[in-house]
Amino acid sequence: MATKPTNNPELLKLRDEIDGIDAEIQRLINARAECAQRVAEVKLEARKSGLEDAVFYRPEREAQVLQRVMARNSGPLDNEDMAKLFREIMSACLALEKPVEVAYLGPEGTFTQQAAMKHFGQWAKTKPLLAIDEVFREVEAGAVNYGVVPVENSTEGVVNHTLDTFLNSNLKICGEVELRIHQHLMIGKNTQQKAISRVYSHQQSLAQCRKWLDAHMPHVERIAVNSNAEAAKRVHSEWNAAAIAGEMAAELYDLDIIHQKIEDRPDNSTRFLIIGQQYVQPSGNDKTSLIVSMRNGPGVLFNLLEAFSKHSIDMTRLETRPSPSGSWAYVFFIDFKGHLEEEHVQKAMLEVRERAVEVKVLGSYPMAVL
Ligand SMILES: O=C(O)C(=O)C[C@]1(C(=O)O)C=C[C@@H](O)C=C1
């Protein structure tokens, strides 16, 4: 239905006001972009004079900018929506300096792609790869600047493959992203709803929706495939199948979502890591990740944990994985709040090093802001 041109004076006046504000916002965004261009020149000058390498993407600075946006926000837009707008402005500004290249665990349409966009914004150049170790290798080879891989899910636990790949890699963790995971049931344009006899998804997503499937589709076969995007792709051309995947996959393969948010736990979320070759400066609100090998024996774990507790360090995660050396030895993956440059962290690290056989620092990086 065509709408008539409005002649309501109040509406016209408000639209005039919006036009004026838009012009002002646009002028300011371009002023900001010019500043970013000058920042790039300063970084390149510093490199020429041998002062430092020109690193354009600065995770600690981005985290600080977003935190400030949220802290000073007075509404009516909520803090997170406002920060998302600034996320995109910064992404466009960084692209003017030098577009950031990011590999992620694909294929296109996965939650990892969503995490990459959430962290780097729409202006990042993204590249899907089909395995976690491929993402590591691509970053190690310098073919891309950063990689994004999943590390843990609040319902299903840790992604062992990501942790194990760190054991043989020199890459650093440069950041983390948290993503609320909403699983949707979707079908193709030719799917006959009554004839659905199988549902495809990644094994983790099937597990996250187990109760819903038991209640609503008890007789439908559940088929695990490599990724949610792969599930969506299959359904696109099958008339008797459905897929469980995220919104991006539905859009990419032109599927219709017939049941939204079917995950069993409403707080279902996944944490992803940004991997790279960069040492990240403190942002003021950071996390540090380590791999620690201990000798087997009584009180070993207690001894390790005591070094952190003595210096009031807030440990956010502890995972145990079999050591690559085998013979029932284990390594600990530890995350705690704080940056390696903070004094209390340095004191705790000294003690950890005394008590451990080996300590590998995976990096200090800003805690997820959005
Ligand atoms: O402050 C910098 O170093 C910049 O490059 C500017 C800027 C920004 O737009 O604010 C852009 C990219 C960086 O990742 C961080 C911040």
Image: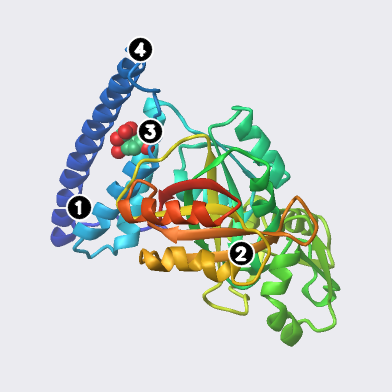
Q: Any mark on residue 48, and which?
A: 4
**Residues at circles 1 and 4 in contact by the CB criterion of under 8 Å:** no
Which amino acid type corresponds to the residue marked 4 in the rendered image? Lys
Is tag 4's residue or tag 3's residue first in the polypeptide sequence? 4
The residue drawn where x is 14% and y is 61% is: 10
Residue for badge 3: 94
Is tag 4's residue or tag 2's residue first in the polypeptide sequence? 4
What separation in Å lies between label 1 and label 4 (alpha carbons)?
49 Å
The residue drawn where x is 29% and y is 62% is: 79
Is tag 1's residue or tag 4's residue first in the polypeptide sequence? 1
Q: Any mark on residue 15, and which?
A: 1
Q: Any mark on residue 319, and which?
A: 2
- Foreground mark, 1 or 3, reads 3
Is tag 2's residue or tag 3's residue first in the polypeptide sequence? 3
Which amino acid type corresponds to the residue marked 2 in the rendered image? Glu
Secondary structure found at label 2: strand
